[in-house]
Amino acid sequence: MKIYLNGKMVDEQNAVVSVFDHGLLYGDGVFEGIRAYNGRVFKLVEHVARLYYSAKAIALTIPMTQEEMIKAVVETCKVNNLRDCYIRLVVTRGIGTLGLSPKKCGTPQVIIIAAGIQLYPEEYYTKGMSIVTVPTTRNHHNAVNPAIKSLNYLNNILAKIEANTAGVEEAIMLNSQGYVAECTGDNIFLIKGKQLITPPLSAGALYGITRGSVIEVAKEGGFEVVEPNVTRYDVYNADECFVTGSAAELVPVTKVDGREIGAGVPGEGFKKLLDLFRKLTRSTGTPIFE
Ligand code: PMP
């Protein structure tokens, strides 16, 4: 496997970064998780834009333009001859000293890995998954803003550990006001009648690209999209629930905190949205081999 590392395609075993890189020492950096379907990188422009927004928010200047980054992602898929893959794009603060100061770091390191990923067992997609609400709250906007896709994921990892302790793989994280924000690595949706409900981004969710894609196709599916503040009561009493992410794609949720959601099986609304989402992933995107 060839990895893109600072402008060069290097063999996997030579794709290494310094132990003084602040991405490793402090989680100081930003990243993206992207998918390619059928020879096209899905929503690549949007993912790269989000990467640069995250970088701006942490005052990190990425040493290449967005156009160059788009080309580098496509090239990484191409040299590995991948038509369907998961792409991890990482930009670290760079090599610094033993001390927090980002001023002492050299050039940011740019890493692109194109490989595979399977977040959840196959049966979650067909039968639905069970999730719980966990005590660790989503970061407050005045701390590490949840809109920043930074390399510091410890807050979400703590929530993931709490989910695992409860015997499940994903968890609802509330914000500091007690409203549903999102999950540890996925956005959350509810269906109630003809309404497709998802917490507003201001509730502390990542500006999910898959979330945006589901909203994009929802009208076609006959849904009215609303973004109110959501409480656990709303989740328990929804007809359907599902989570979204580039790695996870769309996963039906059939149980939350021990309560069955709707009929306790993946619902018709979810299936319709999944179908529309799949059509979108296979008909759009940046071509790899042209
Ligand atoms: N929320 C969090 C916390 C995430 O890490 C992710 C990405 N894994 C998502 C939501 C989903 O975002 P996207 O659809 O852009 O992958």
Image (cartoon, helix red, strand yellow):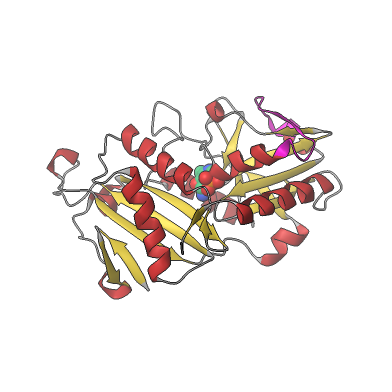
Residue drawn at (57%, 64%) of the image: 118
Residue, x 82% and y 49% (percent of image)?
Answer: 267
Q: Which of the 4 image quarters holds residue 223?
A: top right
Question: Which residue reaches farthest right?
Answer: 263
Q: Quadrant of residue 59?
A: top left
Task: Assign the N terminus to one quadrant of the image.
Answer: bottom left
Q: Position of residue 161 (x, y in %)?
A: 52, 53
Please tell me whether residue 235 is drawn above or below residue 167 in the rendered image: above
Is 259 situated left or right of 11 in this image? right
Q: Is residue 169 visible?
A: no
How many badges with numbers are in the image? Answer: 0
Identified at 35% across, 46% down, the residue is 67
* 226 is within the stretch colored magenta: yes
Q: What's drawn in magenta, residue-wise? A: 218-234
What residue is shown at x 39% (from left), y 49% (from top)? 31
Q: Position of residue 158 (x, y in %)?
A: 48, 48
Give the side of residue 140 with respect to residue 247, left or right: left
Q: Position of residue 254 (x, y in %)?
A: 76, 50
Along the line of sight, the residue nearer the viewer: 62 or 37? 37
Q: Residue placed farthest to the front in the image? A: 290
Find residue 11 and report its horizontal and vertical position in percent.
30, 74
Asked if the magenta segment contains residue 156, the reply would be no
Instruction: Judge left or right: residue 262 versus residue 32.
Output: right
Instruction: Specify the quadrant of the image occupied by residue 99.
Output: top left
User: Between residues 46 and 115, which one lies in front from this camera angle?
Assistant: 46
